[in-house]
Amino acid sequence: MVPFMMTTSISKTALAATAALALAVAAAPAQAQTGPAPLAASASSTTCTPVSESQVAALFDRWNASLRTLDADQVTANYAPDGVLLPTLTNQPRTTPADIRDYFVKFLKNEPQGKIDQRLIRIGCNVAQDVGTYTFQFKDGSTVQARYTYVYEWENGQWLIAHHHSSAMPEAAVARH
């Protein structure tokens, strides 16, 4: 399997913040990983914006509420200008606001609503991750269970989605032996 890389689509700030968060999580003792990671400023004069786990969880609620509007522009407004969407129902990575909007124009026709099934939140300096599983229900009553990752960045006074990966659960598609 070849790793998927998009060096031109993710800001250097997002990459650095995500890498720093990953190192902090890996270095933390196991019992400390149940709560938010401590905020720490980098060697530069970065000011870390405080955020709680409940505030990070509310960012999904904000995104899900924008789905209810059935307005692709309102959904797209949740994403950073250089945000990346690896969507559930297509294979095409979305790396510009226009690409992300295009996906949601089509996705919203099914009137989706998401519900978090399980989640793990990690908090760093001006970056937060919400990782887990969710289920989408559509207007025809069908559902899709998927894994997700949201990486949020504090940008221009608000939390925006820098990276959103969603993929259908593989075990539902694989026949059991």
Image: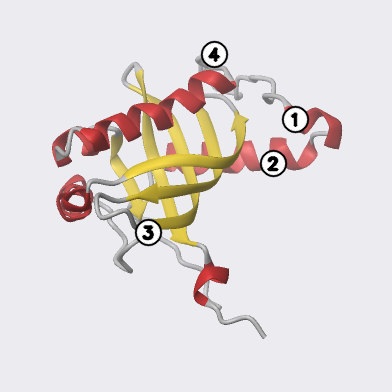
Give yes or no for contact between labels 4 and 2 (Cβ–Cβ under 8 Å): no
Disc with the residue nearer the chain's start (3 vs 1): 1
Label 4 or label 2, whichever comes before in sequence order: 2
Q: Residue at x 16, y 51 (%)?
A: 109
Q: Residue under circle 1?
A: 34
Say which label, 4 or 3, has the lower sequence index.
Answer: 4
Q: Can you say whether 152 is above or below 154 in the image?
A: below
Q: Which residue is mark 4?
A: 50
Crowd tier of the residue under label 1, counting other residues whose Cα lies within 10 Å: few below 14, some 14–19, many 20 or above: few
- Type of amino acid at the residue the image marks with label 1: Thr
Are the residues at dot 4 and dot 1 in contact (C-beta closer than 8 Å)? no
Q: Residues within 10 Å of mark 3 (few under 14, many from 20)?
A: some
Label 3 close to label 2 by CB (< 8 Å) = no
Image coordinates for residue 28, horizontal then vertical, percent = 79, 34
Residue 67 falls in which quadrant of the image?
top left
The residue beneath circle 3 is 88
Spatial distance from mark 3 to mark 1, Cα to Cα?
28 Å
Give the alpha-carbon distance from disc 4 to disc 3, as whole Å: 31 Å
Mark 1 or mark 2, whichever is nearer to me: 1
CA separation in Å, label 1 and label 2 = 16 Å
| Three-letter amino acid code of the residue under disc 2 | Leu
- Residue indicated by mark 2: 23
